Amino acid sequence: MSELTQDSDWVEVDDEGTEPDSDQANTSAAPEELTSTEKNVVRDLASHNIDLREVGANHLNFSSHPNWDEGPNAGTLLPREHASDLLNQLEHGAFLCKRWAGITIPNSGYIEVLIRPNGYIAANSFLMRSFMHSVPEDVDAVCRHAGGAESFLSLQDLFPAKEQAPRLHLTDDAACVEISGPSPACHVLSNSGYRTRARFFLSLKIDFGHSMKQEDLESAAEPILNSLVYELEVRNGVKTRLVRWPPKYDRRRMVRRERSSRIVRFP
């Protein structure tokens, strides 16, 4: 089965997933007023071809990146409390990964890639619980992310069963690696969803701690990403895989539709 077929498929066996019981599902409510921070977020996301679709009391509803080309029903929901974190990531120079569905922040030597269960029919709940019950080999390792001072940004409550995403943090002299919920920028720029359900609930983050060119950053991250995915399956029995963008030649609808700008300029 092709990478595209697996990444584009919505069939999963998370029978405990439910629709959030907040204003996320209410599309007829009167629009809320955007804060100054949120307006800046909307402006910056426009340069990534992502539009604000709806504003709720607690969530912002954004269109999915055109790379997914999944039509008007696909999108991502971001809790409004994370708007400032999203803006901070965007202002630090967040870009889409070229090799995977994820983001890079070259100025910080940071890369983040979405991960999913490896299989046509696989339960996200199993994947989440597998990592919940895992611990790092060096539990006493100390790094600058320890203690919460510079911890990785993570949306911990995207999973519809209302379970908190795990935080599995690994470190050595070369880099810090973490499996946790996607950061706000990774979620909005590279995730997708249907109605109120996010498609991918976890990401793999690598921080090299120094500025790098994007091409060098992705090249340095690739062996770490591949090795960790292999180790997880062989040693830990957790089958995951990196999420990749669909091939360009399969983005058929994107070629045909015109996208109007939501940013109004002074004439």
Image: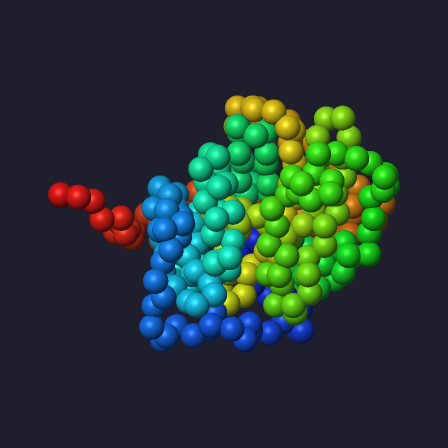
Quarter of the view holding residue 172: top right
Question: Can residue 252 be seen in the rendering of this structure?
Answer: no
What is the number of callouts on the image? 0
| Horizontal arrangement in the rendering, residue 221 relative to residue 214 (left or right) | right
Q: Nearer the viewer, residue 39 or 230?
A: 39
- At horizontal 65% and vertical 36% (from top left) the residue drawn is 206
Give the image's coloring scheme: rainbow
User: Which residue extends farthest left?
Assistant: 267
Q: Quadrant of the C terminus?
A: top left
Rendered position, 18 above or below 224: below
Name the residue nearer the viewer: 96 or 182: 182
Residue 259 image point, x, y percent? 28, 51
Residue under the image location 57 percent in, 30 percent down: 108
Foreground residue among 265 and 65: 265
Find residue 192 and report its horizontal and vertical position in percent.
50, 56
Q: Say left or right for 30 vs 25.
A: left
Residue 132 is left or right of residue 38, and the answer is right
Q: Position of residue 2 (x, y in %)?
A: 59, 49
Residue 62 seen in render: yes
Against 62, residue 217 (above or below) is above
Within the image, what quadrant is residue 9 found in? bottom right
Q: Nearer the viewer, residue 129 or 79?
A: 79
Q: Residue at x 60, y 41 (%)?
A: 112
Give the x, y percent position of residue 157. 62, 61
Residue that appears at 59% across and 34% down: 110
